[in-house]
Structures are given as structure tokens and as C-alpha cells.
Image (cartoon, rainbow, N blue to C red):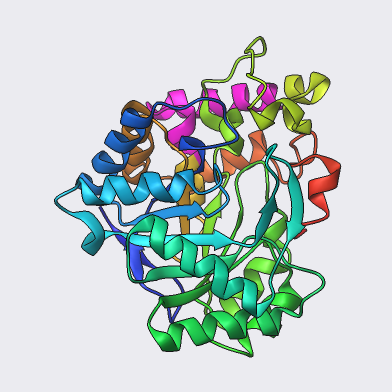
Amino acid sequence: MRTRPLGTTGPRVSALGLGCMGMSALYGEADRQESIATIHAALDAGVTLLDTGDFYGMGHNELLIGEALRGSPRGREQAVISVKFGALRDADGGWAGYDGRPAAVKNFLAYSLQRLGTDHIDIYRIARLDHEVPIEETVGAIAEAVQAGHVRHIGLSEVSAETIRRAAAVAPIADLQIEYSLFSRDIEREILPTCRELGIGVTAYGVLSRGLLSGHWSRDRELSRTDFRGMSPRFSGENLDRNLDLVDALREIAERKGVTVAQIAIAWVLARGEDIVPLVGARTRPRLAEALAATDVALDAADLAAIEAAIPPGAAAGDRYPAAQMTHVAR
């Protein structure tokens, strides 16, 4: 497994990271034992970066990762754990905003350390900006946790270029976690250049657009009531038809190279720069193996031009989240 740096101040991690959210929440039911086996397989393959959120399954995901690490001979020493915090939930699974107050940062952190069974978190970040609390205060609280030894590096998630600059003026920022794929390229205009100017890495989630770019999605697929994609604009009606037409165009390019749609979509993100680390949300060992093989896919200039022609910027139909959630993400 090749490695990449998370910015100029962050750790060096595997070229692909494992996003663990789907093992606990938002994509329907998951198999606990298969999830743990998938984490073990990722570690065995040289994956070091494990990404989670303390609100994924109301703590379930952190407990799952902690269990997986205790059961792996590679365990905690190999893993670089990235944790998002700040999302407020209710007992029915609803969302109630974000809390970035310094006291809340310390509280969230204490619970995460306990659930993960570790004495430190490698990268800690608020999941979404709390518009009631200056980012300087939130980042300052994480910086205090760094000084105390409970956190190693500070990250950001889904924030604007302006917020990135303000945060970086307070303390070193290792990386920005943000959606980036062939279907989501907004960051190329201002956010990605700002990160590169400041020496901040990017951990890209949604590289397969939550399954749309996997090559495995079908128009007649039925979703469970716990799968949030049932409310996602890109998976609805004419938008879904348009997006799957784009996937079919990408499939032709992938087949000419002898790879899968998922592999060429991941390889495209990998080709955008050594400062970008894609997170793959594999929930099973076969999907993980498919994703890992993308690191061996080399895209030349002709390949990249063909991909660009098949899926130009802005081609995807529909926003990446429902309207209410779009107010909390960077554009």
C-alpha cells in the first residue's frame, strides 16, 4: 500500500482510507461480523486511515472500530483514527444541529476516547461548522487537547475557504474532509486551491457518490427506510436516470481499460493529486478488495480526457444532500 501525507503537518497515511460510517448508520442494515472482518482485511492490506464520527449510530461506529482494533494483531499501533464530532441527535435518530463550543469539544472527546478504547485520537474535527460559535474557538479547544496529548492533529470538515484560513491562523490544520468525486467537483474552484496554498491535505469522502459511481447501482433497487439515499436528490426520479446514464458512459471507459466502474472512479480521485486521500466506504470484504485494486489503475492523459468528456464538471443531476442539509456543507 502506497502512502500519502495529510498536508505538511499531518501524518502520512495509506493512499486509500476506510470510511466506516456505513457499518453503523444511514445505509441500511449492516452485518457486524462482516464489518469487523472488513476492517481487519483493510489493516492487513496496509490501510492505516480509519474514519468515523461519534454520531454514527450514536456511538456504535466507534465501539465497532474499538472492538475491531482489539481483535487485530496490527491493532491500534497501525491505525490512524479520524473522528468527527459535534452533530446533535435525538432518541428517534433525528438531527438537531451542531455544537462547537469548547466545553462541548472536551465532552465529545472524552466519550470518543472511552468508546474507541484509546488514549488519543489521531485527527479530530467538527463535522459541520457551528454558525453560533467562531471556528477559532472550536479549533482552539482542539489545540488544547493536542497540547494535553489526547489528540495528535486537527482537521476540518465541509467548510469554506474563508473558514479554512481562519482556522489555520489559530493552529496547524492537517486536512480538510470534504466530498469530492466525478459527481462533486465544487471544491476545485476555491477550496482545493486554498488547501494547497496553506499546505492542508484533503481526505475525500463520497468518491463513489454513495454508490451511484460504484457500477453496482440499478434503477429498480429498493432502499430500506433507514437508508438516507431514499431522500437524496441524486437518487430520485429523473435525476437518478440522468446520473446512471453518466455512469454507463464511464463504464465504457472502464471496460476498455479492463477495470470496474468503481475502480476508475476511485483512480480518478487518486490522480487529482498526492495531497488527496480518498475514503472508500466499503462494508464488505469483496467491495474493499475491489476498491483497493484501484490503487494499481494508472490513468494517462487520454484516459483523463475521456473521463472528462463522459462526466464534465457539473454534469450530475441533483444536489448531494436534501435541501435542509445543504445549508451545512461547503459549496
Does the image show residue 118?
Answer: yes
User: Residue drawn at (49%, 37%), measured in percent from left and top?
Assistant: 24
Residue at the extreme front: 91
Q: Is residue 217 above or below residue 140?
A: above
Q: Is residue 300 visible?
A: no
Task: Classify residue 23 as left or right of residue 170.
Answer: left
Q: How many marks?
A: 0
Taking the image as shown, residue 45 lies to the left or right of residue 329, namely left
Residue 194: quarter of image: bottom right
Whole-percent x, y for residue 298 in the image: 37, 45
Q: Where is residue 66 drawn, in percent x and y?
A: 33, 51
Q: Nearer the viewer, residue 151 or 161?
A: 151
Q: Quadrant of residue 310?
A: top right
User: What residue sits 51% from the left and 37% below the top?
Assistant: 22
Q: Relative to the observer, which residue lies in front, 284 or 181? A: 284
In magenta, the rendered stretch is 243-265
Q: Name the spot of residue 123 as percent of width and height, x first.
A: 45, 69
